[in-house]
């Protein structure tokens, strides 16, 4: 979502005469877009700002802005700790930067402006193979470890028609794949009752669109209508990010996740019935408050059962404004957290390796995205694998081609054009 926000800010600044540069030394404005979901975010921000201060000492006209979740969390503290920063805005107020740059020498406003920012943005210029589109802001779930409901506010969905206009725009710019984004994207519902399934059906009708994906989904919001689309809509790719976070019911309860491992497994069963080859990915937190060795074993067990692919895992870290910080003890030692993280990552990697190797000798449709070096292209399989393709051919970007897989590592497939 931060990548999306940064792109839209870049587009809108461009419409007002700014142009991007790769060289910070020549920049007239530096905008630091920040994420605070896990620890050390604040330190990272101030360490970057320290470097920018040196640039500003050399070039006093340089303007600095900090936007996003760290800015929201700290507000005016940013300007107190770094007096040289002119502008501070949160994830829902960064559109205020546009006018402030023209009219105000400095401003800090981290207020909740709901969907207001979308009314101030220029048409997107993003011309990527994959068009990312935020369809929802915020979250109402209040998982006890998570800072997102504080930084990104209450859950709210953008209007269906507005999203479809943005889909049309990214398709016009050349997108072949559409990726809908939201913290609980499968809970999307606009004021007219339109759902994510409606967005998928409408997008699938656009002939230029070959692939549709969405992320991130909350397990209990996966409706039968959405599950059925994996069966009937060929443009909806057979890959779903459905974070379970932990495999133990006791931990899920403490996390305030509204499902049990049994309910989660039931959802997976339905998904596999709709589309037997669907690949499921997840996020995991290890060492959450009160997590015992047995609880942790339950996470390993569910990984073996579901055979998750492309998953992320993190050590629990305390975050400001969360229920876990206020009411629970962070009682798993740092050593145990590290050991559990190493174990879970080793298991995820071995399952991913086995999964990837199962494609050797098979053929799959790969959407070619880039040409990293002479003689090689890179693309994505329907299951989200990055695939490296060896070929003498030129100009393949944007094509979906049948690729024969001849080798695999845990993180990459290797193939040739069939
Ligand atoms: N809305 C998504 C997740 C958004 S945050 C969902 O509910 O799945 C992205 C990931 O960061 C989470 O899935 C979680 O695994 C991780 N995360 C969030 N808060 C964390 C914390 N305090 N410590 C460690 N990991 C955390
Ligand atoms: Fe955070 Fe939970 Fe909301 Fe995801 S669903 S953003 S983890 S509070």
Image (cartoon, helix red, strand yellow):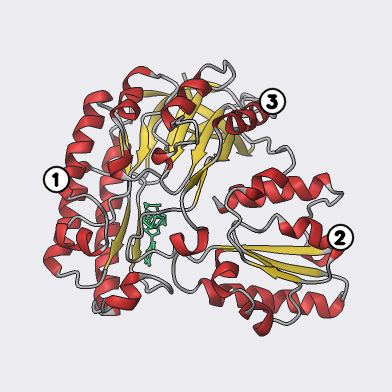
Whole-angstrom CA distance, mark 3 to mark 2, is 31 Å
Label 3 belongs to which residue? Answer: 172
Kindly identify which numbered label has been placed on residue 262: 1
Label 2 belongs to which residue? Answer: 102
Q: Is residue 287 left or right of residue 181?
A: left
Give the residue at x 73% y 37%. Answer: 123
Indicate whether 410 appears above or below 80.
above
For this rendering, which residue is in front, 108 or 238? 108
Picture quadrant of residue 264: top left
For this rendering, which residue is in front, 344 or 89? 89
Q: Secondary structure at mark 3?
A: helix
Q: Residue furthest left?
A: 294
Give the residue at x 48% y 74%. Answer: 40
Q: Is residue 66 left or right of residue 187?
A: right
Give the residue at x 41% y 19%. Answer: 234
Whole-angstrom CA distance, mark 1 to mark 2, is 56 Å
């Amino acid at each position: 979502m931060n990548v999306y926000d940064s792109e839209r800010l870049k587009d809108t600044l461009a419409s007002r005469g700014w142009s991007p540069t790769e060289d910070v030394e020549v920049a007239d404005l530096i905008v630091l877009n920040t994420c605070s979901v896990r620890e050390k975010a604040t330190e990272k921000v101030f360490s970057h700002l320290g470097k920018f201060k040196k640039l500003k000492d050399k070039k006093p006209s340089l303007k600095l802005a900090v936007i996003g979740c760290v800015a929201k969390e700290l507000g005016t503290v940013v300007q107190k700790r770094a007096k040289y920063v002119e502008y501070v805005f949160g994830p829902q107020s960064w559109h205020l930067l546009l006018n402030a740059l023209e009219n105000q020498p400095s401003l800090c406003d981290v207020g909740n402006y709901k969907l207001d920012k979308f009314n101030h943005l220029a048409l997107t210029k993003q011309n990527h193979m994959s068009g990312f589109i935020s369809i929802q802001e915020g979250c109402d779930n209040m998982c006890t470890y998570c800072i997102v409901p504080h930084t990104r506010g209450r859950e709210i969905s953008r209007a269906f028609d507005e999203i479809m206009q943005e889909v049309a725009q990214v398709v016009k710019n050349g997108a072949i794949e559409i990726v809908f984004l939201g913290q609980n994207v499968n809970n999307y519902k606009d004021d007219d009752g339109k759902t994510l399934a409606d967005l998928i059906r409408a997008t699938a009708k656009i002939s230029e669109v070959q692939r549709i994906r969405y992320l991130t989904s909350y397990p209990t919001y996966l409706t039968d209508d959405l599950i059925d689309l994996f069966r009937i809509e060929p443009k909806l790719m057979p890959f779903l990010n459905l974070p379970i976070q932990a495999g133990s019911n006791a931990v899920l309860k403490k996390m305030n996740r509204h499902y049990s491992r049994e309910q989660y497994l039931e959802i997976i069963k339905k998904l596999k019935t709709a589309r037997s080859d669907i690949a499921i990915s997840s996020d995991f937190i290890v060492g959450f408050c009160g997590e015992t060795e047995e609880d942790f074993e339950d996470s390993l067990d569910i990984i073996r059962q579901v055979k998750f692919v492309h998953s992320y895992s993190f050590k629990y870290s305390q975050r400001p404004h969360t229920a876990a910080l206020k009411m629970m003890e962070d009682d798993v030692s740092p050593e145990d957290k590290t050991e559990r993280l190493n174990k879970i990552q080793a298991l995820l990697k071995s399952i991913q390796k086995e999964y990837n190797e199962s494609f050797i000798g098979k053929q799959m449709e790969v959407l070619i995205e880039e040409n990293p070096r002479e003689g090689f292209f890179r693309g994505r399989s329907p299951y989200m694998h990055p695939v490296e393709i060896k070929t003498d051919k030129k100009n393949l970007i944007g094509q979906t081609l049948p690729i024969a897989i001849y080798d695999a590592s845990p993180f990459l497939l290797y193939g040739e054009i069939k």
